[in-house]
Protein backbone atom coordinates (compact mmCIF):
# COMPACT_ATOMS: atom_id res chain seq x y z
CA UNK A 1 0.00 0.00 0.00
CA UNK A 2 1.22 3.52 -0.75
CA UNK A 3 2.24 5.39 2.42
CA UNK A 4 -0.35 7.99 3.38
CA UNK A 5 0.11 8.92 7.04
CA UNK A 6 1.68 12.17 8.30
CA UNK A 7 3.68 12.11 11.54
CA UNK A 8 3.78 15.51 13.26
CA UNK A 9 5.91 14.35 16.22
CA UNK A 10 9.17 13.12 14.71
CA UNK A 11 12.61 14.16 15.93
CA UNK A 12 16.12 14.49 14.64
CA UNK A 13 19.37 14.61 16.57
CA UNK A 14 22.69 15.83 15.18
CA UNK A 15 26.24 15.00 16.32
CA UNK A 16 26.83 18.71 16.86
CA UNK A 17 23.91 18.93 19.26
CA UNK A 18 25.05 15.85 21.18
CA UNK A 19 28.54 17.33 21.46
CA UNK A 20 27.31 20.72 22.64
CA UNK A 21 24.99 19.16 25.21
CA UNK A 22 27.85 17.04 26.55
CA UNK A 23 29.83 20.23 27.15
CA UNK A 24 27.17 21.38 29.61
CA UNK A 25 26.86 17.96 31.20
CA UNK A 26 23.70 16.80 29.46
CA UNK A 27 23.68 13.24 28.16
CA UNK A 28 19.98 12.40 28.32
CA UNK A 29 16.60 13.98 27.71
CA UNK A 30 13.72 13.08 29.96
CA UNK A 31 15.78 10.29 31.46
CA UNK A 32 16.49 8.63 28.12
CA UNK A 33 19.90 8.74 26.40
CA UNK A 34 20.09 10.74 23.21
CA UNK A 35 19.52 8.24 20.40
CA UNK A 36 21.70 7.82 17.36
CA UNK A 37 19.74 9.00 14.33
CA UNK A 38 20.06 9.28 10.56
CA UNK A 39 17.63 10.39 7.91
CA UNK A 40 17.76 6.89 6.50
CA UNK A 41 16.56 5.56 9.88
CA UNK A 42 13.51 7.79 9.66
CA UNK A 43 12.74 6.84 6.07
CA UNK A 44 12.97 3.13 6.86
CA UNK A 45 10.64 3.46 9.86
CA UNK A 46 8.20 5.56 7.86
CA UNK A 47 8.06 2.99 5.08
CA UNK A 48 7.43 0.20 7.58
CA UNK A 49 4.43 2.06 8.98
CA UNK A 50 3.01 3.58 5.79
CA UNK A 51 3.99 7.12 6.81
CA UNK A 52 4.20 9.39 3.79
CA UNK A 53 5.69 12.40 5.53
CA UNK A 54 7.08 13.51 8.89
CA UNK A 55 7.63 16.89 10.51
CA UNK A 56 11.17 17.04 11.90
CA UNK A 57 11.78 18.80 15.21
CA UNK A 58 14.32 18.95 18.03
CA UNK A 59 12.91 18.32 21.54
CA UNK A 60 15.98 19.60 23.38
CA UNK A 61 16.43 22.89 25.28
CA UNK A 62 19.00 25.06 23.51
CA UNK A 63 20.39 26.64 26.66
CA UNK A 64 24.15 26.58 26.82
CA UNK A 65 24.90 29.44 29.19
CA UNK A 66 25.74 31.77 26.32
CA UNK A 67 23.14 33.37 24.06
CA UNK A 68 25.53 33.46 21.11
CA UNK A 69 26.17 29.71 21.39
CA UNK A 70 22.42 29.00 21.62
CA UNK A 71 21.75 31.13 18.55
CA UNK A 72 24.46 29.34 16.58
CA UNK A 73 23.12 25.94 17.62
CA UNK A 74 19.55 26.85 16.63
CA UNK A 75 20.82 28.08 13.26
CA UNK A 76 22.91 24.93 12.70
CA UNK A 77 20.01 22.64 13.63
CA UNK A 78 17.59 24.47 11.38
CA UNK A 79 19.98 24.45 8.45
CA UNK A 80 20.57 20.73 8.98
CA UNK A 81 16.82 20.13 9.12
CA UNK A 82 16.29 22.16 5.96
CA UNK A 83 18.97 20.06 4.24
CA UNK A 84 17.06 16.92 5.25
CA UNK A 85 13.89 18.37 3.75
CA UNK A 86 15.75 19.27 0.56
CA UNK A 87 16.90 15.65 0.22
CA UNK A 88 13.33 14.36 0.34
CA UNK A 89 10.91 17.31 0.18
CA UNK A 90 7.85 15.12 -0.29
CA UNK A 91 8.73 13.06 2.81
CA UNK A 92 9.79 15.69 5.34
CA UNK A 93 8.84 19.04 6.76
CA UNK A 94 10.75 21.21 9.25
CA UNK A 95 9.58 22.62 12.56
CA UNK A 96 12.36 25.08 13.31
CA UNK A 97 14.04 25.39 16.70
CA UNK A 98 14.38 28.72 18.50
CA UNK A 99 17.07 29.85 20.99
CA UNK A 100 14.58 30.86 23.68
CA UNK A 101 14.44 32.39 26.24
CA UNK A 102 16.51 34.76 24.08
CA UNK A 103 13.58 36.64 22.51
CA UNK A 104 15.67 38.78 20.18
CA UNK A 105 17.50 35.70 18.92
CA UNK A 106 14.22 33.83 18.54
CA UNK A 107 12.69 36.60 16.42
CA UNK A 108 15.72 36.58 14.14
CA UNK A 109 15.55 32.81 13.82
CA UNK A 110 11.82 32.87 13.01
CA UNK A 111 12.53 35.21 10.11
CA UNK A 112 15.45 33.11 8.86
CA UNK A 113 13.58 29.82 9.27
CA UNK A 114 10.53 30.91 7.30
CA UNK A 115 11.97 33.39 4.81
CA UNK A 116 15.27 31.68 3.97
CA UNK A 117 14.87 28.01 4.87
CA UNK A 118 11.18 27.67 4.03
CA UNK A 119 10.33 26.02 7.35
CA UNK A 120 6.87 24.51 7.71
CA UNK A 121 6.42 25.60 11.30
CA UNK A 122 8.10 26.16 14.65
CA UNK A 123 8.96 23.87 17.57
CA UNK A 124 8.64 25.29 21.09
CA UNK A 125 9.13 23.69 24.49
CA UNK A 126 6.72 23.85 27.40
CA UNK A 127 9.24 26.02 29.21
CA UNK A 128 12.54 27.58 28.25
CA UNK A 129 15.00 27.87 31.14
CA UNK A 130 12.05 27.76 33.54
CA UNK A 131 10.07 30.46 31.71
CA UNK A 132 6.76 28.96 30.63
CA UNK A 133 4.92 29.65 27.42
CA UNK A 134 2.38 32.31 28.23
CA UNK A 135 4.88 34.49 30.09
CA UNK A 136 4.50 38.05 28.84
CA UNK A 137 8.19 38.20 27.96
CA UNK A 138 7.38 35.83 25.07
CA UNK A 139 4.64 38.10 23.68
CA UNK A 140 6.86 39.43 20.85
CA UNK A 141 7.47 35.85 19.73
CA UNK A 142 3.76 35.00 19.75
CA UNK A 143 2.93 38.26 18.02
CA UNK A 144 5.29 37.37 15.16
CA UNK A 145 4.06 33.79 15.02
CA UNK A 146 0.50 35.08 14.90
CA UNK A 147 1.35 37.51 12.12
CA UNK A 148 2.65 34.56 10.10
CA UNK A 149 -0.25 32.30 11.18
CA UNK A 150 2.41 29.79 12.11
CA UNK A 151 1.87 26.19 13.10
CA UNK A 152 3.73 25.52 16.36
CA UNK A 153 4.45 22.16 17.95
CA UNK A 154 4.77 22.33 21.75
CA UNK A 155 6.97 19.62 23.25
CA UNK A 156 7.47 19.07 26.98
CA UNK A 157 10.80 19.34 28.73
CA UNK A 158 12.33 18.73 32.13
CA UNK A 159 15.55 19.99 33.65
CA UNK A 160 18.12 17.34 32.65
CA UNK A 161 20.13 18.06 35.80
CA UNK A 162 17.21 17.29 38.15
CA UNK A 163 16.27 13.71 38.96
CA UNK A 164 12.69 12.51 38.74
CA UNK A 165 10.84 13.04 42.03
CA UNK A 166 9.56 9.47 41.68
CA UNK A 167 12.49 7.08 41.87
CA UNK A 168 12.40 4.51 39.11
CA UNK A 169 10.32 6.63 36.72
CA UNK A 170 12.13 8.68 34.11
CA UNK A 171 11.13 12.36 34.05
CA UNK A 172 9.56 11.81 30.62
CA UNK A 173 6.94 9.47 32.14
CA UNK A 174 5.23 11.98 34.43
CA UNK A 175 7.12 15.28 34.42
CA UNK A 176 6.71 15.71 30.66
CA UNK A 177 2.93 15.48 30.74
CA UNK A 178 2.74 17.69 33.82
CA UNK A 179 4.95 20.31 32.20
CA UNK A 180 2.81 20.45 29.07
CA UNK A 181 -0.18 20.99 31.34
CA UNK A 182 1.55 23.84 33.18
CA UNK A 183 2.34 25.51 29.86
CA UNK A 184 -1.24 25.21 28.61
CA UNK A 185 -2.61 26.55 31.89
CA UNK A 186 -0.26 29.53 31.67
CA UNK A 187 -1.18 30.17 28.03
CA UNK A 188 -4.86 30.31 29.01
CA UNK A 189 -4.64 32.18 32.31
CA UNK A 190 -2.19 34.75 30.93
CA UNK A 191 -4.53 35.48 28.04
CA UNK A 192 -1.91 34.51 25.45
CA UNK A 193 -4.25 32.20 23.54
CA UNK A 194 -6.91 34.91 23.47
CA UNK A 195 -4.43 37.58 22.30
CA UNK A 196 -2.86 35.47 19.56
CA UNK A 197 -5.59 33.23 18.14
CA UNK A 198 -3.84 32.91 14.77
CA UNK A 199 -1.02 30.82 16.24
CA UNK A 200 -1.98 27.20 15.65
CA UNK A 201 -0.62 25.15 18.52
CA UNK A 202 -0.11 21.37 18.46
CA UNK A 203 0.32 19.83 21.92
CA UNK A 204 2.52 16.76 22.21
CA UNK A 205 1.35 13.57 23.95
CA UNK A 206 -2.38 14.42 23.76
CA UNK A 207 -1.85 17.62 25.72
CA UNK A 208 -0.41 16.00 28.82
CA UNK A 209 -3.06 15.80 31.49
CA UNK A 210 -4.96 18.81 30.14
CA UNK A 211 -7.96 16.71 29.02
CA UNK A 212 -8.35 15.39 32.58
CA UNK A 213 -8.03 18.69 34.43
CA UNK A 214 -9.65 21.03 31.93
CA UNK A 215 -12.23 22.23 34.46
CA UNK A 216 -9.44 23.31 36.81
CA UNK A 217 -7.87 25.55 34.16
CA UNK A 218 -9.62 28.88 33.97
CA UNK A 219 -8.80 32.54 34.39
CA UNK A 220 -9.96 33.26 37.93
CA UNK A 221 -9.11 36.97 37.83
CA UNK A 222 -12.72 38.04 37.18
CA UNK A 223 -13.79 36.03 40.23
CA UNK A 224 -11.01 37.42 42.42
CA UNK A 225 -11.73 40.97 41.24
CA UNK A 226 -15.40 40.59 42.03
CA UNK A 227 -14.57 39.25 45.49
CA UNK A 228 -12.01 41.96 46.25
CA UNK A 229 -13.83 45.04 44.94
CA UNK A 230 -17.51 44.43 45.41
CA UNK A 231 -19.99 43.16 47.94
CA UNK A 232 -19.65 39.45 48.64
CA UNK A 233 -20.98 37.68 45.56
CA UNK A 234 -23.81 35.23 45.94
CA UNK A 235 -23.32 31.57 45.20
CA UNK A 236 -25.31 32.06 41.99
CA UNK A 237 -22.98 34.91 40.90
CA UNK A 238 -19.88 32.84 41.67
CA UNK A 239 -21.30 29.91 39.73
CA UNK A 240 -22.04 32.19 36.79
CA UNK A 241 -18.48 33.55 36.77
CA UNK A 242 -17.07 30.04 36.92
CA UNK A 243 -19.31 28.85 34.10
CA UNK A 244 -18.18 31.76 31.94
CA UNK A 245 -14.53 31.02 32.66
CA UNK A 246 -14.94 27.31 31.94
CA UNK A 247 -16.80 28.05 28.72
CA UNK A 248 -13.90 30.24 27.56
CA UNK A 249 -11.34 27.61 28.56
CA UNK A 250 -13.17 24.83 26.77
CA UNK A 251 -13.41 26.94 23.63
CA UNK A 252 -9.67 27.62 23.68
CA UNK A 253 -8.82 23.98 24.31
CA UNK A 254 -11.10 22.95 21.46
CA UNK A 255 -9.10 25.20 19.12
CA UNK A 256 -5.78 23.55 20.01
CA UNK A 257 -4.40 20.45 18.28
CA UNK A 258 -3.33 17.24 20.05
CA UNK A 259 -0.86 14.65 18.78
CA UNK A 260 -1.10 10.96 19.64
CA UNK A 261 2.56 10.23 20.44
CA UNK A 262 2.57 7.56 23.19
CA UNK A 263 -1.04 8.54 23.91
CA UNK A 264 -3.47 6.14 22.26
CA UNK A 265 -4.69 4.25 25.30
CA UNK A 266 -8.49 4.14 25.18
CA UNK A 267 -8.85 6.27 28.31
CA UNK A 268 -6.57 8.95 26.87
CA UNK A 269 -8.27 9.03 23.48
CA UNK A 270 -11.70 9.20 25.07
CA UNK A 271 -10.59 12.20 27.15
CA UNK A 272 -9.07 13.92 24.11
CA UNK A 273 -12.20 13.29 22.06
CA UNK A 274 -14.21 14.98 24.81
CA UNK A 275 -12.03 18.08 24.56
CA UNK A 276 -11.43 18.46 20.82
CA UNK A 277 -12.95 17.17 17.57
CA UNK A 278 -11.22 14.51 15.51
CA UNK A 279 -10.22 17.29 13.08
CA UNK A 280 -7.83 18.56 15.78
CA UNK A 281 -6.15 15.24 16.59
CA UNK A 282 -2.93 14.37 14.75
CA UNK A 283 -0.74 11.30 14.40
CA UNK A 284 2.56 11.40 16.30
CA UNK A 285 5.18 8.68 16.82
CA UNK A 286 7.99 10.29 18.89
CA UNK A 287 10.59 8.63 16.69
CA UNK A 288 13.48 7.96 17.30
CA UNK A 289 13.10 8.30 21.08
CA UNK A 290 10.16 5.86 21.08
CA UNK A 291 11.75 3.74 18.34
CA UNK A 292 9.39 1.68 16.18
CA UNK A 293 7.21 0.98 19.19
CA UNK A 294 5.93 4.55 19.21
CA UNK A 295 4.58 4.24 15.68
CA UNK A 296 3.05 0.83 16.38
CA UNK A 297 1.32 2.04 19.54
CA UNK A 298 -0.05 5.15 17.85
CA UNK A 299 -1.42 3.38 14.80
CA UNK A 300 -2.74 0.28 16.55
CA UNK A 301 -4.25 2.32 19.38
CA UNK A 302 -6.22 4.47 16.93
CA UNK A 303 -7.45 1.34 15.16
CA UNK A 304 -8.65 -0.23 18.44
CA UNK A 305 -10.40 2.83 19.81
CA UNK A 306 -14.08 2.65 18.98
CA UNK A 307 -14.79 6.36 19.41
CA UNK A 308 -13.34 7.28 16.02
CA UNK A 309 -14.91 5.95 12.84
CA UNK A 310 -13.02 5.19 9.64
CA UNK A 311 -13.24 8.78 8.39
CA UNK A 312 -12.03 10.09 11.75
CA UNK A 313 -9.01 7.79 11.66
CA UNK A 314 -8.13 8.86 8.14
CA UNK A 315 -8.35 12.48 9.25
CA UNK A 316 -6.17 11.89 12.31
CA UNK A 317 -3.57 9.87 10.44
CA UNK A 318 -3.33 12.13 7.41
CA UNK A 319 -5.88 14.75 6.43
CA UNK A 320 -5.75 16.95 9.55
CA UNK A 321 -1.99 17.37 9.23
CA UNK A 322 -2.28 17.96 5.49
CA UNK A 323 -4.60 20.88 6.23
CA UNK A 324 -2.02 22.40 8.59
CA UNK A 325 0.94 21.61 6.33
CA UNK A 326 -0.43 21.93 2.77
CA UNK A 327 3.00 21.54 1.19
CA UNK A 328 2.88 17.88 2.21
CA UNK A 329 -0.67 17.30 0.96
CA UNK A 330 0.23 16.20 -2.61
CA UNK A 331 1.75 12.97 -1.32
CA UNK A 332 -1.66 12.11 0.16
CA UNK A 333 -3.39 12.79 -3.12
CA UNK A 334 -1.06 10.33 -4.80
CA UNK A 335 -1.87 7.72 -2.13
CA UNK A 336 -5.65 8.20 -2.32
Image (cartoon, grey):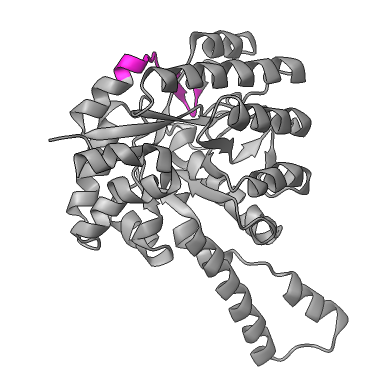
- Percent coordinates x, y for residue 232 in the rendering: 79, 88
Residue 66 in view in this figure: no
Residue 91, quarter of picture: top left
Image: 336 above or below 81? below
Residue 296, quarter of picture: top left
Magenta-span inclusion, residue 35? yes
- Percent coordinates x, y for residue 293 in the rendering: 26, 31
* Residue placed furthest toward the right: 229
Q: Is residue 12 left or right of residue 265?
A: right
State the residue in front, 196 or 296.
196
- Percent coordinates x, y for residue 304 in the rendering: 18, 52
Instruction: Give the total number of marks visible in the rendering.
Output: 0
Residues drawn in magenta: 29-41
Q: Is residue 171 left or right of residue 302?
A: right
- Percent coordinates x, y for residue 6 in the rendering: 32, 39
State the residue in front, 299 or 56.
56
Magenta-span inclusion, residue 141? no
* Residue placed furthest toward the left: 1
**Residue at image x 49%, y 34%?**
171
**Residue at image x 34%, y 59%?**
278
Quadrant for the N terminus, please: top left
Q: Is residue 264 left or right of residue 154?
A: left
State the residue in front, 330 or 95.
330
Quadrant for the C terminus, please: top left
**Residue at image x 55%, y 28%?**
163
Residue 164 in view in this figure: yes
Image: 184 above or below 159? below
**Residue at image x 32%, y 39%?**
330
Amino acid sequence: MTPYRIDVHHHYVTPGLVEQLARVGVHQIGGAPLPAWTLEDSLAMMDRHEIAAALLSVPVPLQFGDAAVSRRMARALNEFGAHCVARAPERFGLLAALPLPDVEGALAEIAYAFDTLGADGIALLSNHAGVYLGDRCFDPVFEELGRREAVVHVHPTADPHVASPVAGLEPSVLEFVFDTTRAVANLIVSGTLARYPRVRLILAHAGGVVPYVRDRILDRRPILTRVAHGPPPSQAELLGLMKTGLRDTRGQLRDLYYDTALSTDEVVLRAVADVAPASHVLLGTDFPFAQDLGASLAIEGLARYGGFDRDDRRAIEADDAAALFPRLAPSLQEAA
